[in-house]
Image (cartoon, coloured by chain):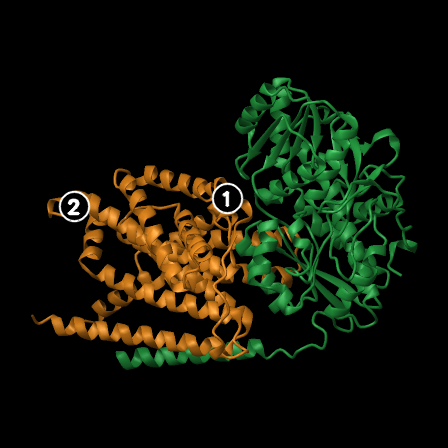
Chain colours: A green, B orange
Amino acid sequence: MKAMNRRKLIKVSAVLAAVSLAVTAVPAQAAVGVSSREIKLGMTLPMTGTASLGYNKIPGAAKAYFDYLNKNGGINGRKVKLIVKDDRYVPTEAVAKTNELILKDKVMALLAPLGTANVKAVAASVNPARRGVPVLFINTGFSGFAEKKKYPTTYTVLPSYVMEAKIMGEYIKDNFAGKKIGLLYQDDDFGTDALAGFKTAGVNFAVKVAYASGSQGAAAAAGWITKFKAAEADVVILFGVSSATSAMLGVAAQLKYAPQWMLGSVGGDATTIKLTGVPAGVLYNAIGFSPVPATTDMKDEYVKFFSDIYAKAVPGSTFDLNVLLGMNTAFMTAQALQAAGRNPTRKSLMAAIDSKGASFANSALVPAGYSKTSHVGLTGYWVGKYSPTGDLSPIGGTYVTYTTDSGSGAVVKSTYVRPAMPAKGLPN
Amino acid sequence: MQRRPVVHKKQSRDIFLFILGGVVLFFLSGMVDELRVYQGATIAIYVIAISSIILLTGYSGQVSLGHGALMAVGAYAAAVTRIEFKLPIILCFVVAVLLAAIGGALLGAAAARLSGPYLAGTTLALAIGLPSLANQFTVLGGEQGLLFDVGFPPLSLGEEFTQYKWFFWIAGLAALISMWIIKNILGSRYGRTWRAIRGNEVAAQLSGINIARSKILAFTISAGIAGLAGALLSMTIGTVSPSAFPLALSFSLLAGAVLSGLTTLGGAMIGAVVLVAIPEIADVVAHRVGSSERVTTNLPGFLVSALLILTVLFVPNGPVEQHRARKAKHLALKK
């Protein structure tokens, strides 16, 4: 009996060993993720689950642009292939899927991973920095990721929460001096960033309400409103995720509570808010912030171009902020790949962003801060108001943009002139 | 008196098999690529977590939908110990086991008064509520969590020795040791007591078994093992955060336990391999077929669910138990 067991065990381990050898016997490539015909990029983000709402449109948006690019010659004849994996917004999954992307699919770079906890876990476990894998244009505004020493291969794109809070503070000083200000924020790094920004801007709050991530809902929102009412806040800033904004606005509509709302960009996408059943009218006159043009602004050449491509690639899907940002990221990536030379490598890709990233054409109305010493992406916002149908558009019809940094630098009105869109929307 | 040598023989065979298993894993880790090593570590961790559920549900007959929460307790305990007291990693794991076991004892005390759907409901609430408690205390790092760094592998293992291989060794060793301990506990008086309770509570009580104490003990041991799995899980992702322990984790572990066969510890491997392999198989299938993104992203869930239904329909006690039963029947027929 014992002998038979052992024999079985030996057989099993022999088979396992043979299989594993076969798996590892793939020949090494000269530049990882780049062949003569293809450039492979990888993306992990929530495609299913509660956190996927809105964000799950990003891969489709990015692919829509890459497909357009590939049909028009690709990058020096190479097609861009985007491999997307669902992480369900769980760090464990994000790590597992990123490992697959880097070790099995052998992608050249990671593109637009989403969520602060996920990006942190991937940095700690997979350690793309040690492997020399570029992590391009991450979908989180946590200011810590711009620390080049800690995350040497990571590039941010969204303006940080600190920048947003500072610009909000500036707007409040200019327009709501003497008014009582209330703040709703998330009790974590997201909120800590915001508080730091408001502090730098010198905003004094009549009331601050913190909520724990995951606790937001109608019942909690009723409690928040009681606090804001008690403090007689004239202006209420909602610096939280979409579900918090939606819960708050939904309950406020029922209770007929209507202060001057000011929405942070993270929870301010009208399409996502309206999807939860909040009537568009509640958004009317609320103040909002965005680094890219209004998604309904068809006079904007980038918005027009992106929405045309998207309508053809994903018919029937609304062109919203997530789509615009997804396509913009793909657009910037294409330029980075083009600038990385005839035979791009991970190193030359990062060098290209370091040297030319600040001048990459893209839809944003604010400058990007890429340089040899900085991996900071976009650095500001324009201020707008929501229309009766819930669309954010610039106050007075023209975009007035502000720019700042994540430190103690001043908020200044930006004179940045966006590069014109390259011919046919292809990198040159 | 006559049985004793048999027991000794069996035990020494078990020890031999466990050591052999360790040696095979050791050599295997040197042969496969980094991704497989990483997946191997994940499988080892799932084996531990699933066996803790098998011990609790399969042997003591108590249902837990909240093992993810107990894993979170272990993970946070290990990370906080590491960060605040800078203890060696092995001690962090010990603390994880102890604290999760204490949590399990408290939960068990409540659970001993509950059964069936009420127990399931209580543990479910725990799975939902407990991880987000971390948001209330700054020492736990809020939603973004804490870094949990077990350090680089010792230099004596060579420069080529990867971090994931180190994780695999730690997780593999932990899995072997905990499986060996669980196997012995289940074979001991306690294991028999639990099986008696699961079979018939009244009869067990009549035979002099203290039901409440036995149930609490089962919960305590199971929680301690789950805590170890949690600490190991956060080791592999380098961080601890509430979102790493979602409700889905508790459910998929339970699904893994059902796939393994709830009453056979030896089957834990099956559930663990399935949980790790299914998403990859789904990926391959979806790409072969060239289907849309929506299919690709939902296929793993569909496959696990389908397997679960098939298991419950055709091998309700798990493949291992089924195989044993068939073999026993076969032998009986032969005689």
Viewer-closest of B79 and A317: B79
Above or below, B14 against A374 in this view is below
- Is any part of residue B271 visible from this angle? no
Labels 1 and 2 positioned on one and the same chain:
yes
Report the residue at 50% width, 51% height from top. B244
Report in which chain the residue with disc 1 lies. Answer: B
Residue matched to label 2 = B210
Q: Quadrant of residue A77?
A: bottom right
User: How far apart are the two marked residues, 1 and 2, measured between alpha carbons?
Assistant: 41 Å
- The image's mark for residue B138 is 1
- Classify mark 2: helix, strand or loop: loop
Q: Residue furthest left?
A: B1
Residue that protrudes farthest toward the top in the picture: A256
SS at circle 1: helix
Instruction: Tell me what residue is drawn at x 23 percent, y 70 percent.
Output: B331
B4 sits left or right of B113 in the view:
left
